[in-house]
Image: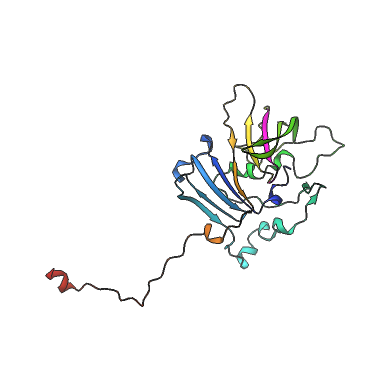
Amino acid sequence: MARSAPWLSTSLRLKFQVPALFADPARSLSGNLDLIIRQREAVAVHNEDDQLVYQKEFFTADRGRDYVAASMSSWQLPASLTSPVYTEGHLILRRPEIAGFDGLLPLDYLASMLDPFELAGTEPASLELAFDHPTFIHELAETTFNDRPVLAAVLSAGYSYKAVNDDFPLVPAGSHALIMLDLATGICVNRQILDPGSDAEDVQLSIVAHNEYYIDSLFTSPAPTLTDVRAPIPWELRNERKSS
């Protein structure tokens, strides 16, 4: 489940409150926000007043000669063209190397929540190596969160655990964390540190819509309007201005 999020959704609409530690008031990225993301190519964020505060997309990016020659990641195949290994339950057993969000998201911590593969790694741990799992499961249960079915687990980090974002490990070293993964999308919708005395905020996402169709214009700035030259344009003459 933790490896599967990129293959379970074409789009998501989320509501969430930005934790104080990651808030960026200078860019209006604080408080309650509404986020729309289409795969890993476009995102738009609105505040509580439905004002657009962040917008970014990659689908209009240049694909010319300079783009192809820019870096190795320029010619790596996108996730839709690679072949992950599936389980019988249509989840990902082994996932291929795919590009991250590459600066698409407004706040870095969201990458770990939207693709929590760090909990399980890109493939199953070796059976020949002891304690090779990225995380250890202490409790596991299916429950609901915000009226959606989730898989909840109490986890601690193993020695091979490697966080995607060093500033926001889903399971900090030496701690126990309650992690909830949405069963339909695979994203982490709730992360809570259970250790007594911890001052870490709970981090939550609420899924509003899944696999809806979003047109390109939701993620791009509106084109400037043209003047209708068929309509006469009034010009104020200097003499008329003086006499008035």
Between residue 62 and residue 29, name the one nearer to us: 29
| Image-quadrant location for residue 131 | top right
Q: Residue furthest top?
A: 196
Q: Is residue 242 left or right of residue 41?
A: left
- Asked whether residue 219 appears in the rendered view, the answer is no
Which residue occupies 51% across, 53% down? 55
Furthest-left residue in this view: 243
Residue 54: percent from left, percent from top? 50, 50
Query: Residue 77's x, y, as percent?
Result: 71, 59
Q: Quadrant of residue 231?
A: bottom left
Query: Is 115 drawn above or below residue 155 in the view shown?
Result: below
Left/right placement of residue 186 relative to residue 29 reads right
How far across and how far down the image is residue 100, in percent? 65, 50
Furthest residue in direction bottom, as rendered: 230
User: Residue farthest to the front?
Assistant: 147
Q: Residue at x 25, y 73 (%)?
A: 235
Q: Residue 181: name its quadrant.
A: top right
Up the image or down, 59 lies above or below 22; here it is below
**Region of the chain picked out in magenta, as a range:** 176-184
Question: Along the line of sight, which residue is nearer the eye, 112 or 232?
Answer: 232
Q: Which image quarter holds the C terminus?
A: bottom left
Q: Is residue 100 visible?
A: yes
- Determine if the magenta segment contains residue 219: no
Q: Residue 71 location, x and y as percent?
A: 65, 58
Q: Quadrant of the N terminus?
A: top right
